[in-house]
Amino acid sequence: MKTRTQLRPLGLGLGVATTLLLLAAGAPDGWVIRDAEAVIGRPITPVSVAGVARRSTRRAIYATSVYAATLPAGCRTVVIDGVALHQCGVTYYQATGGRYVVVRVE
């Protein structure tokens, strides 16, 4: 009886040979999708909900316990879900009570 290690090259060879034969003969219709068939908002598979969930979930803004008296230089104001935030690089700040709290946007 041969071990898996001994059979691995045989399996690899059969896989490569099968692939080459299919490519040489041309794939039957239906094996290769030449054009994108999905419609925006409607996934091609009925069970696929990942795209729907991604588009329908809102971003959440969580305040941290880190405060700053002033904003760093080079910040810009952005509006996320109707909330005005200050984006400084990868960090977001929200004005509150005369100072700024660092917030996480998820």
Image (tube, helix red, strand yellow):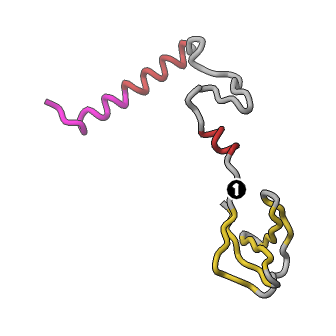
What residue sits 74% from the left and 85% below the top? Answer: 68
- Magenta residues, dominant SS class: helix
Q: How packed is label 1: few (under 14 Cα within 10 Å), some, or many (20 or more)? A: few
Which of 74/20 is in front? 74
Residue 66: horizontal and vertical position, in percent? 66, 81
What residue sits 72% from the left and 72% below the top? Answer: 91
State the image quarter where residue 29 is shown. top right
As drawn, 49 above or below 61:
above
Q: Residue furthest left?
A: 1
- Specify whether 15 is left or right of 44: left
Q: Which residue lies furthest to the bottom in this view?
A: 69
Which of 21/44 is in front? 44
Q: In which quarter of the image is the N terminus?
A: top left
Q: In which quarter of the image is the C terminus?
A: bottom right
Whether residue 9 appears in magenta in the rendering, the answer is: yes
Mark 1, secondary structure of its residue: loop
What residue sits 69% from the left and 71% below the top? Answer: 103
Write down the residue under mark 1: 59
Q: Read off the magenta span.
A: 1-13
Kind of residue sitting beneath label 1: Arg
State the image quarter where residue 31 is shown. top right
Q: How many labels does the image show?
A: 1
Residue 10: horizontal and vertical position, in percent? 31, 29
State the image quarter where residue 12 is shown. top left
Whether residue 8 appears in magenta in the rendering, the answer is: yes
- Specify whether 14 is left or right of 50: left
Residue 44: horizontal and vertical position, in percent? 63, 26
Q: Residue furthest front?
A: 97
Which of 29/102 is in front? 102
As drawn, 95 above or below 52:
below
- Specify whether 21 is left or right of 13: right
- Specify whether 34 is left or right of 85: left
